[in-house]
Amino acid sequence: MILNETTFKYYCDKYNFRYKLVGNHVQINSKRDIWYVPNNQFYVGKTHIKLLHNNIKGKGGWHFQSWFSSYDKLFYYILQHDNKISYSFNKMFRIDKILKQLQEV
């Protein structure tokens, strides 16, 4: 696979993410986090894309997230990751709200 800016633009537009080229690499900003695709993972004949992740909230720092066989799978994973975090975050505050209501009774 070859790093192709057109491909990143297509998927970022589709999922409402932002991207920027950082040297020969790509940084993707989703709703919740920052992702990084190092260009040195793109060699002729290589079939997987490496994805690194940096949490915006909580413990920061870059760490390896996963390998992907296509851009479809990579961007879908980022979308699902953001949605899972959003769901957990909303669920946590819903429980907090219920506990406050119970204390008031």
Image (tube, rainbow, N blue to C red):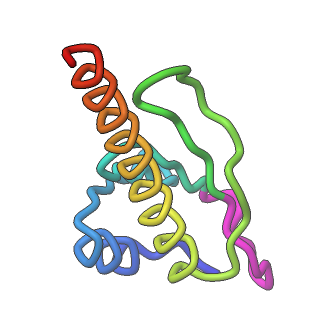
The location of residue 91, given as percent across then percent down, is 38, 43
Q: Please identify the quarter of the rendering in which residue 77 is found.
A: bottom right
Quadrant where the image shows the N terminus = bottom right
- Front residue of 28/60: it is 60
- Front residue of 59/43: it is 59
Identify the residue at the far right of this view: 45
Residue drawn at point x = 42 percent, y = 65 percent: 79
Q: Answer with left or right where residue 87 lies relative to residue 97.
A: right
The location of residue 17, given as percent across then percent down, is 28, 60
Look at the image and say whether residue 74 sits in the magenta stretch.
Answer: no
Residue drawn at point x = 48 percent, y = 22 percent: 58
Total numbered badges shown on the rendered structure: 0
Up-down: is 12 above or below 47? above
Residue drawn at point x = 31 percent, y = 33 percent: 93
Quadrant where the image shows the C terminus = top left
Q: Answer with left or right where residue 66 lies relative to residue 38.
A: right
Residue drawn at point x = 29 percent, y = 71 percent: 15
Identify the residue at the far top of this view: 103
Magenta range:
39-50
Look at the image and say whether residue 41 sits in the magenta stretch.
Answer: yes
Up-down: is 47 above or below 35? below
- Front residue of 18/73: it is 73
Q: Answer with left or right where residue 86 lies relative to residue 104.
A: right
- Front residue of 40/84: it is 84
The location of residue 34, given as percent across then percent down, is 43, 43
Q: Answer with left or right where residue 36 lies relative to residue 82.
A: right
The location of residue 81, given as percent across then percent down, is 49, 57
